[in-house]
Amino acid sequence: MKPGRRFDLRRLLLWPAMLSGLATPVCHAVFLGSCSVPPVAVNLGPYSPLAGSALTAQSTLTLNCNAGVSLNASVGISFSGGLSGNALTRSLKQGGHSLAYNLYTSNLYTEILGDGSGGTSRLTGTIQVQQLFSSTQSWTIYARLPAGQVVPAGAYADNVSITVTID
């Protein structure tokens, strides 16, 4: 190479793709950081089968990220079906007994949180991280337990896993 000329590696990498007529890009982004989500508890409180209305509650899910470079990243958060195995029919369990409930994207209780398939929705957003600093993004999760379910007294619980995808 002649002195004073710059070598552009990007052109070198893209030439084979352009010559072969590929329509897909050959470059991929890599997230150079880490993210964490502290445990989230949604407490519906005491339940009475004689109550005439549903129990509702809300909690906040917070995503904490840091990175070695400044970036804006799209975030998607999926929710498992919990102990029931199905996001559309979640249940709180105690032994062999269960209470139907679900998690929602809003206090309208129409969009069920899941993996985005089969009639469920994921939480989405954008997180902006400044180089060497941490950043947070928060979402409110809404829970609803319908009235009129007759079950024995006791502590009922579910364990829902989340998956965070950074694009």
Image (spheres, rainbow, N blue to C red):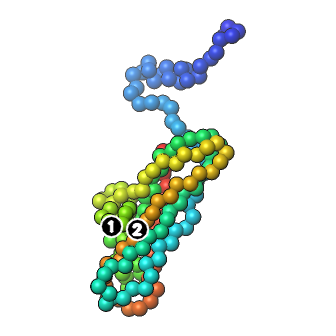
| Residue 122 figure quarter | bottom left
Instruction: Read off the residue under disc 1.
Output: 109
- As drawn, which residue projects farthest toward the right? 3
Total marks placed: 2
Q: Is residue 41 above or below residue 24?
A: below
In the rendered image, is residue 91 in sight? no
| Residue 131 figure quarter | top right
Query: Residue 24's spot in the image, x, y percent?
Result: 41, 30
The numbered mark at residue 142 is 2
The amino acid marked with disc number 1 is Tyr
Q: Residue at x 50, y 72 (%)?
A: 41
Q: Quadrant of the N terminus?
A: top right
Q: Are marks 2 and 1 in contact (CB under 8 Å)?
A: yes
Q: Residue at x 44, y 20 (%)?
A: 18
Q: Residue at x 62, y 17 (%)?
A: 7
Q: Secondary structure at mark 2?
A: strand
Q: Is residue 57 above or below residue 137?
A: below
Query: Residue 108's spot in the image, x, y percent?
Result: 32, 65
The span from disc 2 to disc 1 (Cα, nearest Å) is: 7 Å
Query: Residue 4's spot in the image, x, y percent?
Result: 69, 10
Which of the marked residues, 2 or 1, is nearer the chain's N terminus?
A: 1
Q: Is residue 90 above or below residue 95?
A: above
Q: Secondary structure at mark 1?
A: loop
In the rendered image, is residue 131 in sight? yes
